[in-house]
Amino acid sequence: MDVSQYLEIFIDETAEHIQSLSDNIMALENEPEDHDVINEIFRAAHSLKGMAGTMGFKRMQHLTHDMENVFQEVRNDKIKVNGDIIDVLFQCLDAIEGYLNIIKETSDEGTNDNEGIIAALNGILNGNTAPAVKEVPAASPEEKTAHPEDAAAGAHGKKYLAIGLSEAEREMLKNAEDSGKVLFGFTVYVQKECLLKAARAFLVFKAIEEFGEIVVYQPSAQDIEDEKFDLDFSFIITSDEEGVDKFLSAAKAVSEIEDVFGEQIKYEMLVDTASKEKEHEEEKAVSQEAAAPAVAAPASVQAKGEPAKSAGSAAATTKGKPVNKPVANRTVRVDIEKLDALMNQVSELIIAKNSLVSISSSDSGDGTQSQSFRDQIEYLERITTSLHESVMKARMVPIESVVAKFPRMIRDLSRKLDKKMELYMSGEDTELDRTVVDQIGDPLQHLLRNSADHGLESAELRKERGKPEVGSINLKAYQEGNNVVIEVGDDGNGIDTETVKRKAVERGLVTPEQAENLSQKEIIDFLFMPSFSMAKKITDVSGRGVGLDVVKSNIETLGGDVEVKSKLGEGSTFIVRLPLTLAIIQALLVEVHHELFAIALGSIITIEDVPVSEIKYVQAEEVINLRGNVIPLIRLNEILEIDEPENEPESLTVVIVNKGEKQAGLVVDNLLGQQEIVIKSLGKFISNSKIISGATILGDGEIALILDVNTLM
Amino acid sequence: MEYIETTEATKKQYIVVKIGSEQYGIDISYIDNIVRMQKITRVPTSQFYFKGVINLRGEVIPVMSIRRKMGLEDDVYTGASRIIILKFEQKDALGIVVDEVKEVINLGPDEIDKLSHSSREAKEMFINGIGKNGDELVSLFDINAIIDEHETV
């Protein structure tokens, strides 16, 4: 079977299962007795195994199979979960993730057998050998339905011989045969590209039923109708006449049928295979037993455990797929490019709408314009705005997909660093643009490592300071206006600004005199400089000085910024602010000496009229005192290389903007109002000093450049 | 008939434009569009030879002054001034300002004198050949040199 077209789905679903396993194993560690969790784990492990099998990833399947065995034992209360087992299980998850990463890159699982982990898994089973051996056959309900197909798991086969028969069905077949009817078994393979498998199956049944009665279906008639089968289905019919050829030709006459196998059969043949099937199960159990004690087990399992493995692969086709697809949440995976295209169209619509708005507002003088025209434009405006919102929402994903791996990471760090810590997360359902979510993982991970390694003190020190022994790390996400804020905080030592200052002086970044005058914030900013590590010793967790600067630049490329709040002895919090959207923003249009500029509304605090007489000077820089805050003035015309107006007006229009806690006042000539603008890139040819982050096209076709407030401060 | 076709195939089409008193040829395969002069929005702090950006049917396209880049005196816009929009496979579009667009010509290899970059004269850094169009000579622009970052000082 060509499975390459399923590879993407496989990768996505495997990642989901790994995540769910990871979450649940964490939960299991806290509550080893929770059966719901164990069942959930078992299901995920089982699906993983099945999927790996279907895709032909033998090593991955092997590993997941052994992992499943362990869960099986846990589920049956034969093994008690303890920290060591959890460790092995996590190693196991990492290994599976390793396979997945290799598969992502090469479409192949690579050559790592992970024998050590398999041996460890078997070791766990082994610690419990007796029940383990007994219990494996108990796994058969899971595999029984799957197993029969195993007999024909090759490319094509007579799977009808391996139909699992219920008592009633056996009875019926036996009676039919006794009463002189003839039994036929058939397996029908539909073509891979067949779109309406259920319809084809129906046509086959209809053709067959001209000559006889179908008594047994595999999979069940209902499943066939619901298209819950892969590429083949089998059935057994009873007929009054001999001769298989007319059935075969009737079935093959249905289009999109790849092949049909069938022959006259005897009741014993069916029963025989059923009992063989049992033997298979037992053989498998034996092979498990043999495999368990041996450290270099994989080889023997590979050889003897064959039935078990192919059972897994069949399990995927019959069980794996229906089990995990439909229930959870009803979603459609959409290629991000399609959303991008939709987004672009919405952008154009907004531009068109803006130009209508500007027409409607410009020639209102002659009074010819009817009220209804303006109404319609308002209506259009509402529609485009909500359409824009919907498209944006379609691109939004909860940050959960990124942060879900963190509890596990903190647990590992806790062990590695030998510090007790607990991660508290909130706001995992906060949503961000897909592209932002994809890239925010690494920076957040780094901040968390930072908190765990540098932030939290050792247990002794914590006790000394009267803090709870278990350190806490907080990850909090929430929406704030047009931004999403993610805070990573700890209740550890906080940043020792004196040490940072000393280090900055040592490095020659500032003179000792300058250092004395630095504000706390300016000192903390040193931490974001390249290769400025504060760790006294380099651990493999962090401390190489290639961290915070990368975090900062990563976040800035996403249009966000980082801020730090810290109190020595009480802990520190890194506040990451990210824009909700990347393409369309609300902006204030301003005029500076007849040139138009847009300033993102999100960074504007207020707009003030400031009399020239109120401008003060601090260190030869212009500042204003706004309700007790001293705010530096930025003359936009100077920065933007615009000639100064000849006669300065008596009062200035000042747009007060902020970046984190820093504020500045931008001096503009005129305010033109607020507008929804579509951000366009200036292209790669023009380079400028980052002051201009892009351009937008206004309703009248004019271009306004977008000022990046962050670079001005 | 056949003879003509084969020569047509090896010939390249150029658009002849006028900048100052000289004629220049631009390989037509780079040209996306030719538009009339329109309002150019200045971009502060950009390279001096960029005039700014224009709005071309909803796209923001940077416009370069080829005169400034070649070290000639600044453009004087007239009714004949045009912006030629060049399109590149990987990079975005780019507009260049010319004084006048004259005609389209076909030049075969034998009608082009390749130019080695021996000349130190600034404006010839952007020329990679001289085409003979009847009695007139047309300097052929090296488009890659034009979009190249480095400029005449």
Image (cartoon, rainbow, N blue to C red):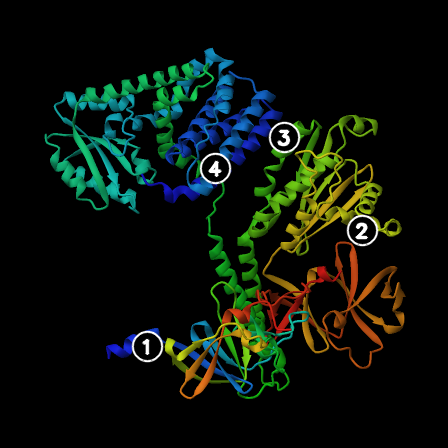
Between residues A361 and A533, which one lies in front from this camera angle? A533
Q: Residues within 10 Å of mark 2 (few under 14, many from 20)?
A: few
Q: x and y percent of residue A551 in the render?
A: 67, 47
Label 3 sits on what residue type?
Asp
Same-subunit check for callouts 1 and 3: no
Which residue position holds label 2? Answer: A522
Name the mark on residue A412.
Answer: 3
Label 4 sits on what residue type?
Leu
- Chain letter for mark 2: A
Check if mark 1's residue and mark 2's residue have beta carbons within 8 Å: no
- Chain letter for mark 1: B
Which residue position holds label 4? Answer: A100
Give the CA distance from mark 2 to mark 4.
44 Å
Same-subunit check for callouts 2 and 4: yes
Which residue position holds label 1? Answer: B8
Give the CA distance from mark 1 to mark 2.
68 Å
Q: Residues within 10 Å of mark 1 (few under 14, many from 20)?
A: some
Residue lying at the far top of the rendered structure: A130
The reply to whether residue A695 is in sight is yes
Q: Earlier in the sequence, mark 4 or mark 3?
A: 4
Q: Quadrant of residue A253?
A: top left
Label 2 sits on what residue type?
Glu
Look at 41% across and 78% down and name the residue there.
B112
Label 1 sits on what residue type?
Glu
Between residues B43 and A469, which one lies in front from this camera angle? B43
Q: Secondary structure at mark 1?
A: helix
Q: How many marks?
A: 4
